[in-house]
Amino acid sequence: MNIESARPLIPILIVLITTILIFLSRKRPNLREFWSIAGSVLTFISVASMVPDIWCGQKIIYTLSTIAPGISLNFRVDGLSLVFGIISSFLWIFATFYNIGYMRSLNEHAQTRYYTCFAIAILGAQGVSFSGSLFSLYMFYEIITIFTYPLVAHHQDEEGYAGAKKYIIYLMGTSKGLLLPAMILTYVLAGTLDFADNIVSGIFRKETDCLWVAIAYGLFIFGFAKAAIMPLHNWLPSAMVAPTPVSALLHAVAVVKAGVFCISRVMLSVFGVELLQSSHLGLYTAYFVSFTILAASVIALTKDDLKARLAYSTVSQLSYIVLGVALLDVSGITGGIIHIANHGFSKITLFFCAGAIFVATSKRKISDMAGIGYAMPFTMGAFAIASLSMIGVPPVAGFVSKWYSGWSRSDIKEAPATMVVPIVIAASISVALGLFPEFFVGLVGRMLP
């Protein structure tokens, strides 16, 4: 059942008003920071207020304007929307308090510009969350890109400008060169840019040429370069020249999460499960992102700079989200989507710890951090917990999402019983030999002097 209501606009309007108040309070730092805190809290409350309706299986929809048939600036709230909407608004609260401590401790310049751009990036994230069409999604996706550029270049030095240049070239280049053509092709093939009502059927007609569908799909996957799927990942490590709270925004709160959210939304609400299964596009996607998972993890181990290692960890973990959705069954999709939340909390913890280490010690390289756990036990204790979540150790959050993805079902069945029974018996005997080793120990003992 759909509920027609303008409530999806409320979080976006709250962030917009907050942004204006932050800018107007530029000469009063305490008031400026108060607006940041108040805005983040009110945004989260407004998003959370929609949970009861969605929990009951309803959707909230609202059309602000219709540009052309099938092209609308519209909004919708469903379960996927709320996962990203809640995470980005709730983590904004944490990031705001952390921002205040970090920026004041280092006496950073241009703080009003910083807080203003930070807030607009959250506005973009909320808009992406609650978009009801590709048209709306694209508009807010670009808002995130534009207003995070000044944050990446915040230090205004050679390194900062170089990282920001790569950032904007990658993200604007792919959105204009790949994402826009994908939307145009989709509109030609489907006649609409509105998302489907369910994730099964998608918006394409059954008679649509599979080749053109595959081309549109590939353009979308690579067009959303914020997802940092290899080989379009290099902007993310380069963006680590930004202040640590910005790195947290990039990795945990808004930017890369917007990328994987958009890919998930397009896979489920544009192409649909049936089409991705019948065309094997889901399977090919799973293979492709699996390479990113493995390669980025290996590269991460070679990095001595802490933020660079965390950056490549993010590249890997983002592809876990896409992999889960690409499995195209209930368990896999569930695991992939909830990893948006689980990774968000874990990764923001890791980047906040990296920032705390830098503020306290001015150290960036892991090789220089011997004994840091004794000096900063609370920070490194939190770092350890978040690291365990990254690798999926129970009972930390990352375990849950990876468990669901790991239990994803397919058409594969057990081998014949004549093969399975010996396997089970051999495994059982290996357990017994571990518990009761005396027999073979005794035999060996008979031959020894």
Image: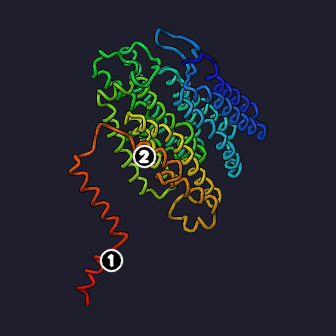
In the depicted structure, whether residue 321 falls above or below residue 395 = above
Q: Are marks 1 and 2 in contact (CB under 8 Å)?
A: no
Q: Which residue is mark 2?
A: 316
In the depicted structure, whether residue 388 falls above or below residue 60 = below
Q: Position of residue 28 (x, y in %)?
A: 79, 38
Secondary element at tag 1:
helix
**Quadrant (top left/top right/bottom left/bottom right) for the N terminus:** top right
Residue 277, numbered circle: none
Residue nearer the viewer, 258 or 146:
258
Q: Position of residue 387 (x, y in %)?
A: 51, 54
Q: Is residue 210 visible?
A: yes
Which image quadrant is residue 425 in?
Answer: bottom left
Secondary element at tag 2:
helix
Tell which residue pokes out farthest to the top in this image: 69
**Quadrant (top left/top right/bottom left/bottom right) for the C terminus:** bottom left
Q: Nearer the viewer, mark 1 or mark 2?
A: 1
Give amino acid for label 2: Ser
Determine the residue positioned at 20% across, 50% down. 418
Q: Which residue is mark 1?
A: 438
Determine the residue positioned at 61% across, 30% down. 51
